[in-house]
Each structure stands twice: as structure tokens, then as C-alpha cells.
Amino acid sequence: MTALSEKPPSRTIGDRIVDLLEKQTWIVYVALAGLLYLFATFSPYVQVSVSGTAMNPPLSDGGRYLAVNKPNALCIDDAVQAPHPDNGSKAVRMVMALGGDRVVFDETGYRIAGRTTPMSAAWQAEAHAKGGDALTVPQGHVMLRRADPDAADLAEYEAFLMVADDTVQSVLIRALYGTGQSFWSPLPRPQTRCISTRGIAG
């Protein structure tokens, strides 16, 4: 009597895909590279590195932060990345005033909407020399500054106007590495006053 041969178990499509991937591992690497490219190209988030002490506090020299690309709004005290007007390099600065704000400089610092921020003596002297006693931020613009205008070792006054559209590239929202803060801890965003970045003419 002839022995009946056992019928091989049926294979599912999933089994066949696994076999293919085991034999052709390059497919996995190509797929992963494609996913990483798509994430880097179309993700609303970007990693921003801070260099120098101009933003300390709240940001640390050498720190890396998570930022939102092309933000819908900018708020007072937001830490943002934008091209520096002098050379176009990427600069991280703080939003100090919004379109329509009147910035008044006096012996105590600068005052905006009833809020006074202290300034070092060097900042006060240079601010008066460059901007006089007061200026009004044009509508559709923001005024950016270094983080601590009252820092004793920060002699150079620097504040510049920028159109509040996609020119401001990103808003920093969370700490990542080398920041002196816990990983993923949120950066303070009081959002007391904000301006939309959409539909603004340059």
C-alpha cells in the first residue's frame, strides 16, 4: 500500500512577505530611509540648536530644542528662530513686541502695554541712540530681541523688526538635549498676547 504524503500547510500572504523581507533585507532599509525622508520633509517639527549665551536664560548654550515649523501665531516671550537681518544666518531670539505695540525706552528699561522689562545701562544708551525714546512696531510685524536685556555681560543692544509671516521659521516648544532641563520638558509660553502669522502682507 502506498503511503499517503502529507499536504504542506497553506501559506498566507503575510508568510510570503516575511520570507521576502528576510531574503531581501535591502527593501527594509530603503523603506525606512524613505519614511525618514518624508518625516524630515513634511513634519511640522524641527530640531533647533542654540549656540552662544545671548538667549541664556531661558535657553542654554549648546542646547537642542524641539520647535514647531511655520507657526500659526507668535506670542510675547516666545523663543523663535528667524534669519538675522544683518547676514541672513539663523538666529534664535525672543518676541518682545507685536504689531501696533508702542515701545517706550526710559531709565528703568523698556515698557510695552504697561509691562516694564529692565535693561542694562549699555542697552539703554544704545537703544536711545538707535531708536530714540519710543517707537511703534508696524502692523504685521514683530520685534525680536536677545533673551536677557539686563544681563551684565551683554553689552550690545540688539532688537530688530521682522514681518510676522513665514519669515519667522519656527517656535521652540520643548527641551531635548544639553539644555539643563529635563528631556521633553515644555518651554514656558505664557501666550498673554499673540499675533497671527497668516494672511499678512510682507
Image (cartoon, helix red, strand yellow):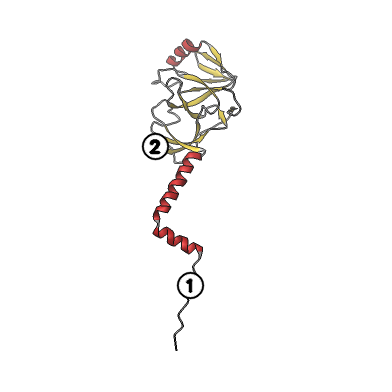
Rendered image quadrant of residue 50: top left
Residue 133, position in %: x, y? 53, 11
Residue drawn at (44%, 29%) of the image:
57
Above or below: residue 91 compared with residue 14: above
Residue 36, position in %: x, y? 45, 44
The kind of residue on which mark 2 rests is Gly
Which of the numbered marks, if any, corresponds to residue 178?
A: 2
- Say which label, 2 or 1, has the lower sequence index: 1
Observer-nearest residue: 1 or 186?
Answer: 1
Above or below: residue 110 compared with residue 45: above
Residue drawn at (49%, 19%) of the image:
160
Observer-nearest residue: 148 or 64?
Answer: 64
Q: Secondary structure at mark 1?
A: loop
Observer-nearest residue: 20 or 163?
Answer: 20
Q: Secondary structure at mark 2?
A: loop
Q: Residues within 10 Å of mark 1 (few under 14, many from 20)?
A: few
Taking the view exactly as shown, the residue that stands out farthest to the front is: 2
Question: Disc 1 marks which residue?
Answer: 9
Q: Inspect this view and state whether residue 198 appears.
A: yes
